[in-house]
Image (cartoon, grey):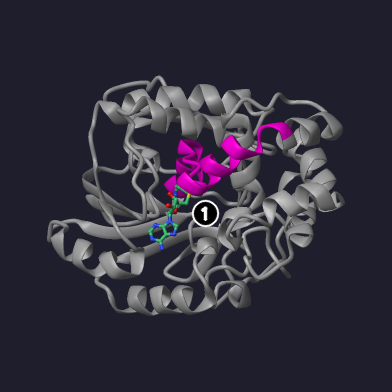
Amino acid sequence: MRSSTDPKASTSERYRQFAEVEATGMSACYEAWALGVAGDPTVIGLIDSLPAPKRQPNLVLSAARFCGAEVGDYPAFATWLAANWARVEETCLSHATQTNEAARCAVLLPALAQLQGPLALIEVGASAGLCLHPDSYSYRYVFAAGPVKRMLHPAAGQSPVVLECEASGPVPLPAALPEVVWRAGIDLNPLDVTRQHDVDWLTALIWPEHADRRERLLAAVKVARGEPVRIVRGDLNEQVTALVAQAPAEATVVVFHTAVLAYLDELERGRFAETMAGLPARWLSNEGQGVVPGVLERLTEPPVARSDFVLALDGTPVAFTQPHGRSIHWLTPAPH
Ligand SMILES: C[S@@+](CC[C@H](N)C(=O)[O-])C[C@H]1O[C@@H](n2cnc3c(N)ncnc32)[C@H](O)[C@@H]1O
């Protein structure tokens, strides 16, 4: 299946795929815009003037909103885009899709909490590093069945950032948040939570209808400003081994990533999986179906939705997750 980030797919295919798999049910505006683009040769002509990796729907639509495109129907958007293409083009060329969603910590947490602490966290593809503070957020897990809600708070008390997550299946929620003694990230282009331009770009990357996510972003940025984290600039395959070697010996090192490996080609993904197998670290991945080598083949039940991510620990699937961290379905472990 072609994905919206696949530079080998045609622009029309990429936008249709984005509309039908990623935006549907998540953003009526982006679904309409992407479907409109998929069938509009004039706009496709503009987008095709960009290098192939820069044609991805999430980048072009975010750049348009960063430059002032108003939420509305497709014809108005197409007219606006034609009139403002030079600015949108410049923004696409100088920026990348680096959506940083602190709420993804809510789906990482149950897996992190199963590991022997204290933890040293390394996030590859960290963007601005908002997912490197799972111990600084509060969590509200809402179960469809059974005891309705479970709250978890940092040791210092309730956080201004409360991550709400719908939970199903036997989610192993801990009694307390894990202790994190060291943290660092890697990114091709680290964003800086203290730079207003970077925060504005992160805001534009949030889909139009997701007001709660914009609010959470700004609250999480404040939390992250209070605890600066080093994010190494570079490719994850080039940097991860050296960073693991720098983590404190007394901690369990966890290399994790969410919504990152789709940006790598198959060879690079395979290389990363091989590296992880040989490193003295646990490996927590939260990625689209079929993105992490070997994970899909080990599923014991089919995903609930096509857009679900698969959370895997050391290559073994443990949960299906909503891509922005809104829900988690923990898998029943396979009998031995
Ligand atoms: C969609 S963002 C996800 C950010 C964060 N993990 C989260 O879930 O909120 C993907 C990030 O991966 C980074 N990235 C993509 N390819 C990379 C690579 N080869 N090496 C390091 N970082 C990469 C991008 O720069 C971007 O910041």
User: Label 1 neighbourhood size at 10 Å, few (<14), some (14-19), many (20+)?
Assistant: many
The residue at the point 62 percent across, 78 percent down is 297
Q: Which residues are magenta?
A: 83-109
Q: Nearer the viewer, residue 21 or 15?
A: 15
Point out the image quarter for the N terminus. bottom right
Measured from the top left, where is residue 142 in percent x and y?
61, 33
Secondary structure of residue under mark 1: loop
User: Is 166 located above or below residue 310 in the figure?
Assistant: above
The residue at the point 33 percent across, 26 percent down is 223
Residue 213 left/right relative to 15:
left
Q: Nearer the viewer, residue 151 or 201?
A: 201
Is residue 34 visible in this depiction of the protein?
yes
Residue type at tag 1: Ala
Residue 109 left/right relative to 123:
right
Q: Nearer the viewer, residue 319 or 229?
A: 229
Q: Is residue 103 magenta?
A: yes
Measured from the top left, where is residue 185 in percent x and y?
29, 51
Q: Main structural element of the magenta stretch: helix, strand or loop? A: helix
The residue at the point 42 percent across, 60 percent down is 284
Pointer 1 residue: 259
Q: Nearer the viewer, residue 174 or 262?
A: 262
